[in-house]
Image (spheres, rainbow, N blue to C red):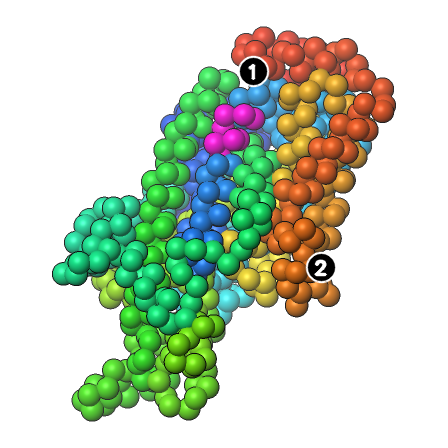
Amino acid sequence: MDWTIFWVVATFATYIGIAIWARAGSTNDFYVAGHGVHPVVNGMATAADWMSAASFLSMAGLIAGMGYGGSVYLMGWTGGYVLLALLLAPFLREFGKFTVPDFVGDRYYSDAARLVAVICALFVSFTYIAGQMSGVGIAFSRFLGVDFNTGIFAGMGIVFVYAVLGGMKGVTYTQVAQYVVLIFAYTVPAIFISLMLTGNPVPQLGFLSNIKGEDVSMLQKLDQTVRDLGFTSYLSSTKTNFDIFCITAALMFGTAGLPHVIIRFFTVPSVRDARLSAGWALVFIALLYTVAPAVASFARLNIIQSVNETTYVPPAEHDAASAALAEAGETPSPAWFANWETTGLVAFDDLNGDGKMQIRGPAAPDGLANEVTVNNDIYVLANPEIAQLPDWVIGLVVAGGLAAALSTAAGLLMVISSAISHDLCRRTFFKDMSDKAELRVARLAAAGAVVAAGFMGIFSAQMAFVAQVVAFAFGLAAASLFPAILLGIFWKRMNREGAIASMLAGLIPTFAYIWHFKIGAGKAATAQDWFLGVSPEGIGFVFMLGAILVGVVVSLATKAPPQDIQDLVEDIRIPGKRERHGIADSGMAPVD
């Protein structure tokens, strides 16, 4: 039995079945699941929405490849969620409008501000979703024997069915199933590998324990191994402290401004339930995030030990040639490397012509150059193969990776759909649109977004790791949406002129900086060329500070907001005090 096909078909059938069962019948169902989701269920769905392909596939890969330096992603995303759950979500839920552009448009009493927020939300969502689709393509291309682009098209098809059919209601219950799949798929292999390497069944403790049969800890052994090969110590970073700080901050504040997570807090019945679901989501997220550093260190050590100094065997002749080499007393390159080589995500270049695969760092003591390239996005997917775990475990991990990518992609599609149908059409250009017409436009928008997201996923494959593509979305969210949300909640003097200026002052330079250094003419630039030495991954934080400053200065230089708005800002800080306030609720009533 092909376990990979079994798991993928079984999970996809489950998602489609749930979508049919939870089919949306109204705009209320489509946008906010009828406000009837239980806090625990919403916490699980939020965790699945939150833990994308970047968390599942790439975060451990980045930590494995960068060592301590890769932990900025772990710290930034975790800290950002806490910031969102404690600082923003309850107040946004109290405000009572169910999209971020809705909040901006009504808080700043301006269709122009709403339009700018729609543009920001679309920029952020499409950038983020491109990373998810890239992760889907990687999983399909290796395990289902199809090429990268075909894998993305398959992922587009499944998301299209359950997002367009079920809306937020279908997405919510599908994400619950996806959370169960992804957390099981992530932790089971980690437990097996932890037992094999250290004898400890708890991965979070295993990577701090001694190697089985040796008097040296797992981390010390890995650190010594990479330094012996000429790499930077696993326990240090090549980035400056200031750059690390900026990347972490950009991820944190970007998280708090991500529209697909914020919208989840409108699916529960009350503000109290929003707070409860935020707490539950943190518990569910921690189950995966605390395992990631262990998975990273296990994978890095396993890859080095299974590949370095083996005799290279091409994929086409691997079985026969490996047996012959083994009989001759040589160690052939592993089967997992041959399997992944056909995807182009690992490569061997025999620079010294000796037929041996040498993994070396820039400061290798024997002077040899590195001949082996491993894409960081495959660490989690390849880990069970490298450890020679049973086929059903390998298939389960593939299903988990797809669940992580598709759950977040579906959440982002809901943001894109609501931004176009609700914020752009109904609230800005066609204010007499009926519920039925809005629902039809929402489904069409979701369908168009699926197609666009797929092509962006193909394009994003030209960039670095999935997590780094996603990091750009966080930078854009931090610089554009976060200042308007933060000041909109906590500073009643913030007005529409300040909000519009702030969003544009954050979005435009951040996008231009990332484009220049990652795609444009500055692609070959080094850290010395970066503004203040800050990498494109961290620049969102710098421009976020600038955007806050612009918002404050422009607001103070222009007319104060109407009294209704200032009263509203006072209301939302006290649970249960929210009242209707003329201009702020003229377009639609706040949700109960």
Q: Residue at x 74, y 48 (%)?
A: 509
Dominant secondary structure of the residues highlighted in magenta in the image:
helix
Whether residue 81 is situated above or below residue 200 in the rendered picture: above
Q: Is 571 included in the stretch rendered in magenta?
A: no
Q: Position of residue 587 (x, y in %)?
A: 73, 21
Is 538 on the left-hand or right-hand side of 146?
Answer: right
Q: Quadrant of the N terminus?
A: bottom left
Q: Residue at x 52, y 31 (%)?
A: 83
Q: Position of residue 240 (x, y in %)?
A: 55, 53
Residue nearest the observer in this picture, 229 or 520: 229
Whether residue 352 is situated above or below residue 416 in the rendered picture: below
Question: Number of marks in the image?
Answer: 2
Secondary structure beneath dot 1 equals: loop
Residue 443 in view, yes or no: no
Whether residue 334 is situated above or below residue 105 in the rendered picture: below
User: Of the residues shown, which amino acid type is indicated by label 1?
Assistant: Asp
The Cα–Cα distance between marks 2 and 1, rounded to whole angstroms, is 45 Å
Q: Residue at x 37, y 72 (%)?
A: 229
What crowding class fits label 2: few (fewer than 14 Cα within 10 Å), some (14-19), or many (20 or more)?
A: some
User: Of the residues shown, which amino acid type is indicated by label 2?
Assistant: His
Residue nearest the observer in this picture, 561 or 271: 561
Secondary structure beneath dot 2 equals: helix
Q: Residue at x 51, y 53 (%)?
A: 467
* Residue where numbered disc 1 is placed: 592
Is 436 on the left-hand or right-hand side of 269?
Answer: right
Residue nearest the observer in this picture, 429 or 570: 570
Residue closest to the far front: 365
Magenta stretch in the rendered image: 81-88
* Residue where numbered disc 2 is placed: 516
Residue 68 in view, yes or no: yes
Q: Position of residue 499 (x, y in %)?
A: 75, 30
Q: Is 87 included in the stretch rendered in magenta?
A: yes
